[in-house]
Image (cartoon, helix red, strand yellow):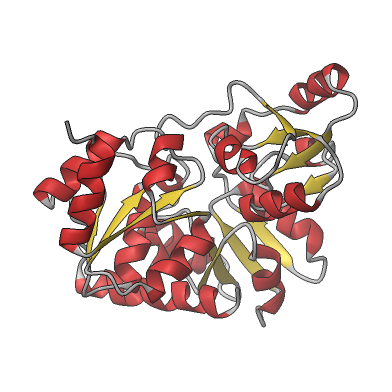
Amino acid sequence: MVSVRERIARLKNERNAVILAHNYCLPEVQDIADHVGDSLGLSIIAAKCDADVIVFCGVTFMAESAKILNPKKKVLMPEPYATCPMASMCSAEQIIDARKKHKDACIVGYVNTTASAKAEMDICCTSSNAVNIVSSMKEKDVIFVPDVNLGAYVRSKTPSKNVILWNGYCPVHQAITAQNILDMRSEHPEAIVIAHPECRSDVLETADMVGSTEKMIEFVRTSDAKEFIVATETGMEHRLRNGSGEKIFHFIPHALCSVMKMTSLSSVLKALENMEHEVLLTAETAERAKTPLEKMIELK
């Protein structure tokens, strides 16, 4: 009997498709992907992709970004209702209103936003390049959307800028508390704490290292430490374990994004079989959102 993985592999070849998966997806989905990474890495891969079909395993804003960067390609979203809660906390209309209130400010937007919101930004960023991008802006006033925690982290690293924060957040990272970290430190006193900058400021203050998912992976692989407390989404454990030898990882049990876990092998297979759940954007939105995304990639 042909397995689901084998059927996906066959259809991928027949469709000339590439499968992209975010670090927070289920382990079995990461394992069948051609590329696994963070938002920036997957955006760069999508921009250079020569496949006819892109199957994006993650949340909707990621698939939209792939479509914006590859307007002539067919982009499929296996779970079309896998919508990032934080992306829903910043609309195009809200950004337009913010520009009216802060006429001299530029808009730097986290890539975790909808295509329509990106269309109103000056430039996008990810957690790995947010500090560099804000530093590079000629304007002193920078409205940072939508993540208040990443924005606060960027503000702490860019004292020459007036970073205006937005009231948005990732529910998963917001739910990680400093007390969670302190409790885990007491249980694992030899462990190094690594944290994603989407966490709250008091959590970041407890960390030995703060960085994007890719920087976390690099840190772990090059560190002499054998044990780590990881303040980010639990899906990262799969990639951290790959290539890390016998190192031990401790995650906050409740730091799980159910939306990122929606994509399954079955939904990937169904999308390829039926060529369904194609990402469609208006030409105007796609064209206007492309500029801030391309600027982000240029300044990576």
Residue in front for this viewpoint, 149 or 276: 276
Residue in front for this viewpoint, 137 or 187: 187
Residue farthest to the left? 274
Residue in front for this viewpoint, 214 or 239: 239
Residue shown at the point (69%, 48%) measured from the top left: 197
**Residue 124: x %, y % from top left:** 51, 67
In the rendered structure, the answer to whether residue 55 lies left or right of residue 210 reads left
In the rendered structure, the answer to whether residue 126 lies left or right of residue 56 reads right
Residue farthest to the right? 189
Q: Quadrant of the C terminus?
A: bottom right
Would you say residue 190 is visible in this rendering? yes
**In the depicted structure, whether residue 207 falls above or below residue 175:** below
**In the depicted structure, whether residue 98 falls above or below residue 123:** above
Residue shown at the point (65%, 53%) measured from the top left: 212
**Mark count:** 0
**Residue 16: x %, y % from top left:** 21, 65
Residue in front for this viewpoint, 190 or 103: 190
**Residue 271: x %, y % from top left:** 18, 46
Q: Quadrant of the N terminus?
A: top left
In the rendered structure, the answer to whether residue 142 lies left or right of residue 292 reads right
**In the depicted structure, whether residue 282 falls above or below residue 181:** below
Residue shown at the point (46%, 77%) measured from the top left: 294
**Residue 2: x %, y % from top left:** 18, 36
**In the depicted structure, whether residue 206 falls above or below residue 275:** above
Would you say residue 116 is visible in this rendering? no
